[in-house]
Image: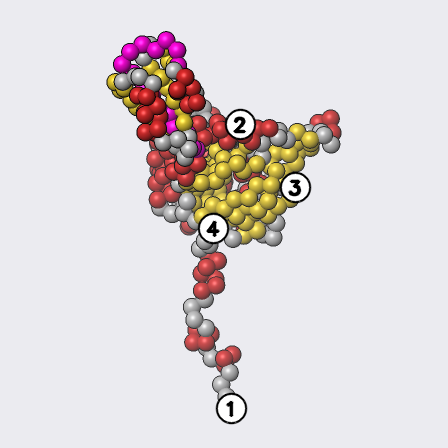
Amino acid sequence: MALSVSDLPQDAAVPAAPVNRAADVPENAVEIENLVKVYRTDRGRTKRALDGVSLTVRRGELFGLLGPNGAGKSTLINIMAGLVNKTSGRVRIWDIDIDQDPRGSRAAIGVVPQELNLDPFFTPRELLDVQAGLYGVPKAERRTEEILHAVGLADKANAYSRTLSGGMRRRLLVAKALVHAPPVLVLDEPTAGVDVELRQHLWAYVRELNARGTTVLLTTHYLEEAEELCDRIAIINHGRLVALDTKAGLLARVDSKTLRVTVDRDIDAVPSALARFAPVHEGGRRLVFRYEPSRTRIDELLDAIRGSGFGIVDLSTEESDLEDIFLELTRRSGDHAAEDAA
Ligand code: ADP
Ligand code: MG
């Protein structure tokens, strides 16, 4: 009798289950497809807070979602966390569809909310224990002390939350989000209203978590924060994705540089030979040129300046920074504000 595969012991018949292992460690931590959220507001109006956002956060990334107030950042995060119902679209956290397995997807994500919503009569230790209970983390597997230590609250473990400073509360919220050891940590405006020192502290901690393998998604309206922390940055405005790139990639998009020149004598009026470059006369002997490197070479500019009879005494160039790009992208996409009539 021929031996069929099903007669063999499982281990011998099939190689080590690559499918399951792949599912445990997905390529992408978060996949969002064409996500739409329309809020119903009072007086029968609707607000399209997300207008077809698609993006992917890769496993291991420290990903930034950047956008001005009202852009839709919290809405997006709250949908991921199962706190807000989406209107349409698809969301997968750690390969788990939030519609198909809401409990599973919630277990894969820890969210630090924008609001400091803590029960004032719990101590940090109690709060973390309650949270662990909610997530069904067995007592033996709880890491309460370790987490309290990591966020620098070990010595406040038994203090009432209401006695904690704003910075401590923020850290306690981070701790709360880490209780069930989620592979994906989401921080909604982690440093809004936080002082500079604590900001640095939180940034260092987020970096450390990320270095130890947690995928981090943070929202911010501080450019500096995205710039400082994030591998890739998505920019959203009026519920739409307007860019998604590395910092370097975003910078490379903007075709704009500034050249400042000091010439060897006073300038009464911009010479006509320079008019086509539209320089700004900053007063005295200084001219400022904003130009597009893809269209204008710097030697062309310098030749034109010399050609109009000036000697160049000093010069400097400036690249655009992320601030310029952010302003340009959000301005460009600002036309279709999304308040719809019902
Ligand atoms: P962000 O976090 O980027 O500041 P939000 O996601 O909080 O933006 O808000 C996006 C838009 O949706 C805003 O115009 C906001 O006023 C509106 N919005 C948020 N939550 C609600 C809600 N519960 N009901 C009605 N409109 C809402
Ligand atoms: Mg928000």
Q: Position of residue 139 (x, y in %)?
A: 44, 48
Q: Secondary structure at mark 2?
A: helix
Spatial CA span between label 1 and label 2: 75 Å
CA separation in Å, label 2 and label 4: 31 Å
Give the image quarter of residue 230: top left
Of callouts 4 and 1, which one flags the residue occurring earlier in the amino acid sequence?
1
Q: Magenta segment, which residues?
A: 254-270
Q: Element under label 3?
A: loop
Q: Earlier in the sequence, mark 1 or mark 2?
A: 1
Q: Which residue is mark 1?
A: 1
Q: CA distance from mark 4 to mark 3?
A: 23 Å
Which residue occupies the foreground of this view, 22 or 292? 292
Q: CA distance from mark 1 to mark 3?
A: 58 Å
What residue is pinned by disc 2?
Answer: 331
Mark 1 belongs to which amino acid? Met
Q: Residues within 10 Å of mark 4 (few under 14, many from 20)?
A: some
Residue 212 forms part of the magenta stretch: no
Q: CA distance from mark 3 to mark 2?
A: 27 Å
Q: Amino acid at mark 2?
A: Arg
Residue picked out by circle 4: 28
Identify the residue shown where x is 64% and y is 34%: 48
| In magenta stretch: residue 258 | yes
Mark 1 in CB contact with mark 2 (< 8 angstroms): no
